[in-house]
Image (spheres, rainbow, N blue to C red):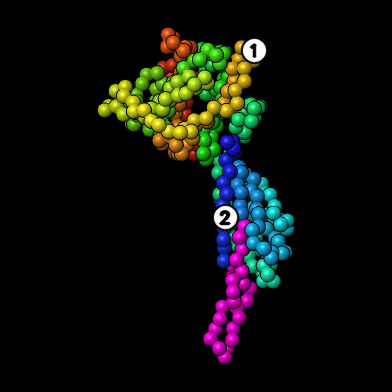
Amino acid sequence: MDMKNIKIFSFMLALVTASTLLNSCKKDKAAPLADLLYEVTVEGNDVKFTPKTTGISGYKWDFGDGTSSTDESPMHTYPGKGKYVPTLYATVNGKAVESSTVIRIAKTTPVKFNTGDLSDWAAVTTNIPLGATKGVFNEVKMDYDGNYVYLYAEMAVKKSDGNIFDFYLDSDNNITTGLLTGTFTEGGYDILMEGPFLVGNMDILYFSGATQDAWSWDPQSISEAYTVGTTTEAGGVLKYEMRFARGKLKGLTGSGLRIGIQAVKNDWSAFVGNAPDENSPSFFLDMSE
């Protein structure tokens, strides 16, 4: 599976020619339009422009951010999130034409998921605070982009321990919906993801209680709702990354979420760690960019 989020937009744009053929003695006839097809490939802030129409010459790309290029198929890096209107000025079969389109650059992340290297997480500065009941958790980080919520953890465990994890997600950041629990306060938890995901799978459950105090969950069958990426183990420390698909989990496409994580022994005999502390507010991940 391609671990990068790549969107390809193809635009067929009818371009108005620089002049119109007029004949005063005959019925007016419009000049044939010169069609221009080009492909735009967006990967983070990097955009590749690839012409598809034949007979093009005299390329000039205005990228819509104050920069330009005369290359045939340029690669351009936009300065950040926003809407840009690039324009191609060219000659098609002898006719001067131009074409514009709209590109939207979403919030990006330094995380290069599942590359076999976790060093990119050093650039992520959003940490879940850990305290007195952190147990086996040494560090937990989070980030997001338009499609995924990413999580990284360092734990003083072995993968073979088969720990069971409970991920409590207040996916819509609305305390009036979802389960109210003292385990992690200030959230109404709409989603519970539970299981030994490092050695097996997790169940995905949506809250269905008649009241917010009722422990009632409906199991869901959602493919690729989460993905485990690179995992390393050395010196008694387990490091791993995972991601949650925002478009597949209920409510996760909003501007923020709350999360609380518990780790349990594989026989359910004892809790071994919390992020953040048990009986404290869950962690709020601001996704308003």
Name the element at disc 1: loop
Please count the marks in the image: 2
Query: Residue sitting at 61 percent across and 52 percent down?
Result: 40
Please give the residue where the numbered disc 1 appears in the rendered image.
235
Expressed as whole percent of the image width and height from the top left, the position of residue 132 reads 50, 12
Query: Residue sitting at 60 percent across and 26 percent down?
Result: 230
Q: Nearer the viewer, mark 2 or mark 1?
A: 2
Cα separation, mark 2 vs mark 1, equals 49 Å
Please give the residue where the numbered disc 2 appears in the rendered image.
10
Q: Are marks 2 and 1 in contact (CB under 8 Å)?
A: no
Is residue 156 visible in the rendered structure shown here?
Answer: yes
Q: Main secondary structure of the magenta part?
A: loop
Residue 31 higher or lower than 193, as above or below = below
Is residue 252 visible in the rendered structure shown here?
Answer: no
Expressed as whole percent of the image width and height from the top left, the position of residue 54 reads 67, 63
Q: Is residue 249 left or right of residue 67?
A: left
Residue type indicated by callout 1: Gly
Query: Residue sitting at 60 percent across and 23 percent down?
Result: 231
Name the element at disc 2: strand
Residue type indicated by callout 2: Ser
Expressed as whole percent of the image width and height from the top left, the position of residue 153 reads 56, 22
Q: Which residues are magenta?
A: 15-38
Expressed as whole percent of the image width and height from the top left, the position of residue 265 reads 47, 12
Was residue 21 drawn as part of the magenta stretch in this picture?
yes
Q: Is residue 53 left or right of residue 163?
A: right
